[in-house]
Image: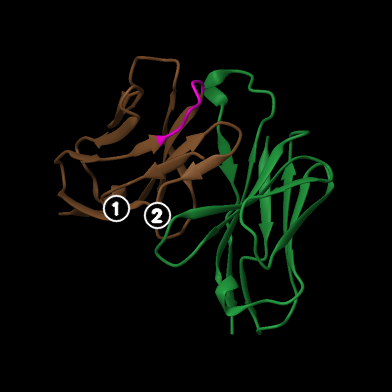
Amino acid sequence: AQTVTQSQPEMSVQEAETVTLSCTYDTSENNYYLFWYKQPPSRQMILVIRQEAYKQQNATENRFSVNFQKAAKSFSLKISDSQLGDTAMYFCAFDTDKLIFGTGTRLQVFP
Amino acid sequence: SQTIHQWPATLVQPVGSPLSLECTVEGTSNPNLYWYRQAAGRGLQLLFYSVGIGQISSEVPQNLSASRPQDRQFILSSKKLLLSDSGFYLCAWRRKVYGPRALYGYTFGSGTRLTVV
């Protein structure tokens, strides 16, 4: 069975600084997608970034980038130039034909 | 455009009462549909998913059931609610045919906050 582990329940960062959220997963599949989702207090699920397993190049979306290490089954999210609006729960998720989530990391950005 | 509707937004139900949460998708056909539950301060747990009408896969044995009476409708039900059924329920859909890879992903409804009292 696929599992996703986020070992950091809570993180904090000062505005304009950089923070990295960790995620590891376990699977025997070779083709899959990985996602990071943001959930603000409204609880709406917002896609932050996606990575296709067959692509070696790390995905980047503006201030958000990932470090995808397929052999190590690691998929960390780096947020650069943190903003107050980045305060939220962040979920790592693994996908083949169904999305399996980690337990989440609560990120607090301080002014 | 493709949209997903989920209702109601908030629900307070007594223990032992029935439950029916509905999710519908517009602007697409033959989607994969999913029900997730999120307990307070925790991650999302996959409850059910469906790849077609009448096809339901259960991920966690429990007090809940799901049905897909129409292509774009997914219903979560219970005959008798338990206190442990309280939580935030999210419906999601995903295209079965991937199409442009840049568009691949899941779309979530706005959720239902269920409190069983």
Residue B41, percent from left and from top: 39, 64
Q: Residue at x 49, y 54 (%)?
A: B44
Majority secondary structure of the magenta segment?
Answer: loop
Q: Residue at position x 63%, y 22% from top?
A: B98
- Disc 1 sits on a residue from what chain? A
Q: Residues within 10 Å of mark 1 (few under 14, many from 20)?
A: many
Q: How is the image coloured?
A: by chain
- Residue A40 has which mark? 2
Q: Which residue is mark 1?
A: A87
Q: Amino acid at mark 2?
A: Pro
How far from the left and from the top, in percent, is residue B105? Answer: 55, 32
In depth, the one of B105 and B47 nearer the eye is: B47
The answer to which of A110 and B69 lies nearer the viewer is B69
Circles 1 and 2, Cβ within 8 Å, touching? The answer is: yes
**Residue at mark 1 to residue at mark 2: CA–CA distance:** 7 Å
Check the image and report above or below for A10 versus A15: below
Q: Quadrant of residue B43?
A: bottom left
Q: Which chain is green?
A: B
Q: Colour of chain A?
A: brown
Residue A90 percent coordinates (x, y): 36, 48
Q: Could you tell me which residue is drawn at 44 percent across and 67 percent down?
A: B40
